[in-house]
């Protein structure tokens, strides 16, 4: 998924060419504060979204502080523009809100991308302009305050007896 999150498919590049991106997935899941989910469509993984805490020394573009996790999100090209990214974000906000006050993300500084994240409650961090490690495109950091609500998962209320005899 990291390959798609950083648009390596569009740049026709390989993840191995960017060892600095390893911080977003290396040893992911070994900390109880690593949170993530994936979306399925047509029995295929359609996308993934995850957050993790990083340290200032990691030099991540979206770094705010050591209590604010950084979001990484990707939707496979064939599943884009179907609401999958929005659905993953909304669920991740609920899950993350049980643990964190806010999350940050580094996004391309263009109207479409910034607008998408603003629609989901992210705000731009002033003077956060940087360059993407992939193609030197301008990126900005955005941050979202997380809701403190009861976590409701898509499978809540699921009863397998409804289809079993």
Image (cartoon, rainbow, N blue to C red):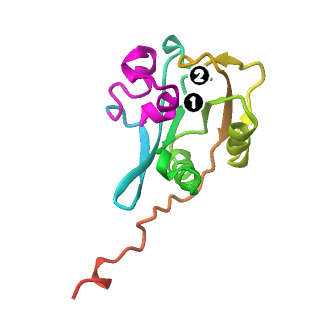
Task: Work out whether residue 10 or residue 16 is closer to the camera in this orientation and state it.
Answer: 10
Q: Residue furthest top?
A: 57
Q: Quadrant of residue 135?
A: top right
- On the image, numbered disc 1 is attached to which residue? 68
Expressed as whole percent of the image width and height from the top left, the position of residue 89 reads: 56, 49
| Precedes in sequence: disc 1 or disc 2 | 2
Picture quadrant of residue 140:
top right
Separation of disc 1 and disc 2 at Cα?
8 Å
Name the residue beneath numbered marker 2: 63
Secondary structure beneath label 1: loop
- Considering every residue shown, the one lying at the far left of the view is 165
Q: In the rendered view, does 43 fall on the left or right side of 7?
A: left
Quarter occupied by the C terminus:
bottom left
Helix, strand or loop at mark 2 = loop
Asked whether the beta carbons under mark 1 and mark 2 sit within 8 Å of each other, the answer is yes
Disc 1: CA contacts within 10 A as few (<14), some (14-19) or many (>=20):
many
Tell me what residue is drawn at x 54 percent, y 59 percent: 150
Residue at 45% x, 64% y: name it: 154
Q: Position of residue 86 (x, y in %)?
A: 59, 52
In the image, the segment drawn in magenta is 1-29
């Amino acid at each position: 998924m990291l390959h798609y999150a950083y648009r390596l498919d569009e740049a026709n590049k390989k993840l191995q060419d960017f060892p600095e991106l390893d911080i977003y997935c290396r040893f992911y899941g070994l900390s109880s504060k690593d949170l993530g989910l994936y979306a399925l469509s047509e029995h295929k993984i359609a996308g993934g979204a995850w957050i993790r805490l990083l340290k200032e020394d990691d030099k991540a573009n979206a770094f705010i502080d050591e209590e604010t996790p950084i979001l990484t999100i990707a939707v496979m090209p064939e599943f884009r523009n179907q609401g999958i990214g929005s659905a993953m974000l909304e669920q991740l906000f609920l899950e993350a809100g049980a643990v964190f006050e806010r999350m940050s993300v580094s996004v391309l500084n263009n109207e479409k991308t910034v607008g998408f994240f603003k629609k989901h409650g992210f705000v731009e961090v002033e003077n956060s302009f940087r360059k993407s490690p992939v193609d030197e495109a301008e990126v900005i950091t955005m941050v979202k305050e997380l809701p403190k609500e009861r976590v409701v998962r898509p499978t809540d209320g699921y009863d397998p007896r409804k289809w079993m005899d």
